[in-house]
Image: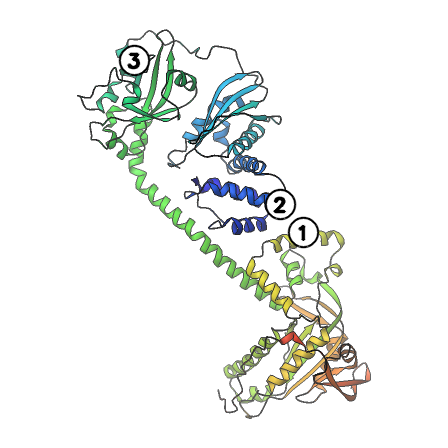
Amino acid sequence: MFYGIIMDTVRDGILRSYGPMLWKRIVSEVHIPSETFEFYERYDDHILINICDCMVEILNDGTRESFLQFFGANFIHYFYRYGFDKILRVAGRTLRDFLFVIDQLHDSNRFTFPQMQHPLFHVTEEDNHGVILHYKSVRFGLAHFAIGGLSAVASLLFNLKDLNVVIQKDLSNDRYSHIVFHVQFPNYKYEVKRLFDLPVLPNLSGTTFFRVFPFSILMDSSLKIHRMGNHIMKAFPDDTPLIGRPLDQVFRLIRPDIHVEWDKILSYGRHIVFLMDNRLPLRVGSTGKIRLKGQMKYIQNKNMLWFLCHPVLGSADDMISAGLHLTDLNLFDSTSDLLITGIHQEHQLEATIFKQHLWTKKLPAVQKKLNVCHKKNQRLLYSTMPKHIAHLLQWGVRANSICECQPLVTILFVYCLDIKTISDHLNAADAITCLNKTIVLFDTIADKYDVFKVEIKADASYMLVAGIHDQLHMIVDEHQRNVLSTKLTDETSEVDDEEEDETQDEHNKNPDGLNSSEIIAALSLEFVRTSEHFYNPISKKPFHLKFGFHSGMAIGGIVGSRNYQYCLFGDTVGIASQITTTGEVGRIHMTHTAYSHLIEENRYTVEHRGQTNIKGKGLTDTYWLTGLNEKSSKVSINSDSTTVKCPFSNPDLTF
């Protein structure tokens, strides 16, 4: 099982190098429970292998081994970026020194991650051109992850760009993976000397030595206990024979995972931390445990091994389990200080970790709420201006510099002649309620079409436009357009499935590819059908509504410095407004320009109204839209047949 912090380095590497969309796809295809990992939770080892295989399939590039090396390198870069480089830097002055203490670095995390099953790294040979490094792990198939990590350490910490790690042998069995690496690099610090050429101990009596180091064990070449420190002996019952017994009868070797043999211990003892606990019952009872950690020292002139160790104690419970007291501990190390401090801070630490776990578990829910709020904000913003204009504002383009030319749009006005009557006879609250219900009904109908609501004027006009397209090239120069395009692409890559569905729905609003005049025509017909059920709550008669639209060029842009508003300007707006105000109640009017675009596909029936005097244009032909042409293909733009309930269908409605 991997701790979540390891998996988070994998996630971080994918996000940084390949982007969030690839990570989301991997989460889906590998069936990872969440897009984020809890640092102290444990996850199945196979997730990492599955992620590598998934990336090979998606990217159609690389191999499982190459991606494992990538994740191993990012593992080191991850901790380097977040301030853990100090513990790596103090590991050794050279890469050679670092390779000798990897096991100790792993062991330093035993309190933070007590169930971590870290691999064992052991140097057995070295020369001027590198070292022979043994890698042992209970996990299989991750040797290339270790290679990536070693390469990153060499590059980041020791500026060695030419490190070469070769798999020399594979000694794995069904219990663990055992790989022999030849780590090739300029090993300038190598000095030829005998393997066990260690400093000679001073001439001290055994009694004096064991008084100074009360936690130590002396063994002969047959690995039988020759002598033992008094504080270790006190942990066992008085009638338990210890001296003269083989080491593996009294203690169980936990790390390294080797057979308790003289040659193996000599080979590993130079730079591997040994960890063992008791096999025989302690004085406190059969469930008691004492765990010893230290280094094996070879005494050459006596041909003996001296295990210089100390008890591994993380809390007062560990002391009770081992049957030890503070007076048994050495005064020259910090074990007693840590225990005393730990007793006072243990409850606070547990409470802090518990809160951290709670907040970590809440993170996906908080992220989900944040996404929901973000979507609401985006929908609100997109309701006030076209999406491409909103994107420009979000990325820092000055509002008043946004001005675009729309070469062909169709603008529809709807005028309600009953507003004055309502405002004269209803109080303010009821008048607003009545107006709001009308606008909400119009908006509900308009949402089914590919149109944009520009504004509602004080003269009770409702204005819609079809045919607004992204005119980014009219607003910014080529360099700015490239920069904004990159930013908008990055933003689009973070859109989730729900937003993609919404985008798809927008495309479905115009499946037949109607032009802007045909879209407005279909919308106008539905407005008219629905308005037949509009009843004025004062007169108890249908609302008096006028409809009119015109096609042409328009200029769009943002006005205002605080309350931004997207507006359309030009003759097209004025002509559409005039064709509506000069029209008849309950009928849909259009100009000759709109008519010429509407009859292209012969989808609608139109009547010639006559000539109308338009300000600035003089007399011009105008037309009435009367319905759909049954002989032509049906307009499927409103094929969902959504029923819209009219709030004023009851003529007796009162406020």
Residue 550: x and y in percent read: 74, 78
Q: Is residue 587 above or below residue 333?
A: below
Q: Nearer the viewer, residue 259 or 205?
A: 259
Q: Is residue 600 above or below residue 119?
A: below
Report the amino acid beneath label 1: Thr
Is label 2 in contact with label 1 (beta carbons under 8 Å)?
no
Report the amino acid beneath label 3: Phe
Circle number at residue 486: 1
Sequence-wise, the earlier of marks 2 and 1 is 2
Q: Quadrant of residue 60?
A: top right
Q: Is residue 364 above or below residue 412?
A: above
Q: Which quadrant: the N terminus?
A: top left
Between the C-alphas of marks 2 and 1, the distance is 21 Å
Left or right: residue 567 compared with residue 222? right
Q: For the residue labelled by badge 2, is the local secondary structure a helix, a strand or a loop?
A: helix
Residue 238: x and y in percent read: 18, 21
The residue pinned by badge 3 equals 209
Sequence-wise, the earlier of marks 3 and 2 is 2
The residue pinned by badge 2 equals 59
Report the amino acid beneath label 2: Leu
Between the C-alphas of marks 3 and 2, the distance is 63 Å
Q: Mark 3 or mark 2: which is in front?
A: 2
Q: For the residue labelled by badge 1, is the local secondary structure a helix, a strand or a loop?
A: helix
Left or right: residue 230 compared with residue 111? left
Q: Nearer the viewer, residue 605 or 30?
A: 30
Q: Badge 3, how many Cα within 10 Å: few under 14, some, many 20+?
A: some
Residue 143: x and y in percent read: 51, 32
| Residue at x 40% of width, y 36% of height | 116
Between the C-alphas of marks 1 and 3, the distance is 71 Å
